[in-house]
Image (cartoon, rainbow, N blue to C red):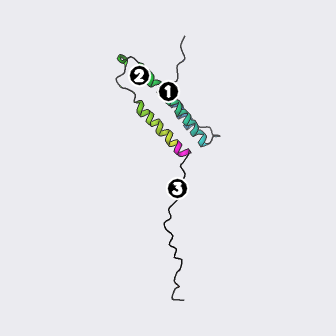
């Protein structure tokens, strides 16, 4: 009997892309971005599982190239931070209009 396989990282990323680009017309942009955040969390968990499996694998059976988990995590964090900045912007700082002159007297034109 075949055991059920967990979805691959590529399948998770494909699902994220599909959901981002084919969102439900009735959902708001913020709802879709919240869904994207949850999917990024799932991708993070999948990456963590893959890292654990790679660390536990037989050193003699390792591949020539290694997956850069650190860079993948940095990219996920960058995406999360960008979505957070968009959905929860920091409070706007008051504008500095400069100093008030305090001099409101003006001379009359001489030609009148």
**Measured Cα–Cα span from mark 2 to mark 3:** 47 Å
The residue segment tinted magenta is 84-105
Q: Main secondary structure of the magenta part?
A: loop
Q: First in sequence: mark 2 or mark 3?
A: 2
Q: First in sequence: mark 1 or mark 3?
A: 1
Mark 1, Cα crowd under 10 Å, few <14 / some 14-19 / many 20+, is some
Q: Is residue 107 above or below residue 7?
A: below
SS assignment at label 3: loop
- Pinpoint residue 82: horizontal percent, then vertical percent: 50, 43
Tag 2 residue: 55
- Which disc is residue 46 wearing? 1
**Measured Cα–Cα span from mark 1 to mark 2:** 14 Å
Tag 3 residue: 93
In depth, the one of 85 and 103 nearer the eye is 103
Q: Is residue 75 above or below residue 3?
A: below
- Pinpoint residue 14: horizontal percent, then vertical percent: 51, 31
Residues at circles 2 and 3 in contact by the CB criterion of under 8 Å:
no
Residues at circles 1 and 3 in contact by the CB criterion of under 8 Å:
no
Residue displayed at 34% across by 23% down: 64
In the figure, residue 37 lies in which quadrant?
Answer: top right
Q: In front: mark 1 or mark 3?
A: 3
């Amino acid at each position: 009997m075949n055991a059920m396989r967990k979805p691959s990282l590529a399948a998770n990323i494909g699902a994220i892309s599909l959901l981002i680009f084919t969102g439900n017309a009735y959902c708001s942009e913020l709802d879709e971005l919240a869904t994207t955040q949850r999917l990024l969390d799932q991708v993070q968990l999948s990456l963590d599982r893959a890292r654990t499996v790679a660390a536990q694998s037989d050193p003699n059976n390792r591949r020539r190239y290694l997956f850069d988990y650190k860079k993948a995590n940095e990219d996920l964090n960058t995406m999360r931070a960008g979505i957070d900045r968009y959905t929860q912007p920091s409070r706007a700082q008051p504008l500095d209009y400069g100093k008030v002159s305090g001099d409101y007297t003006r001379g009359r034109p001489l030609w009148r």
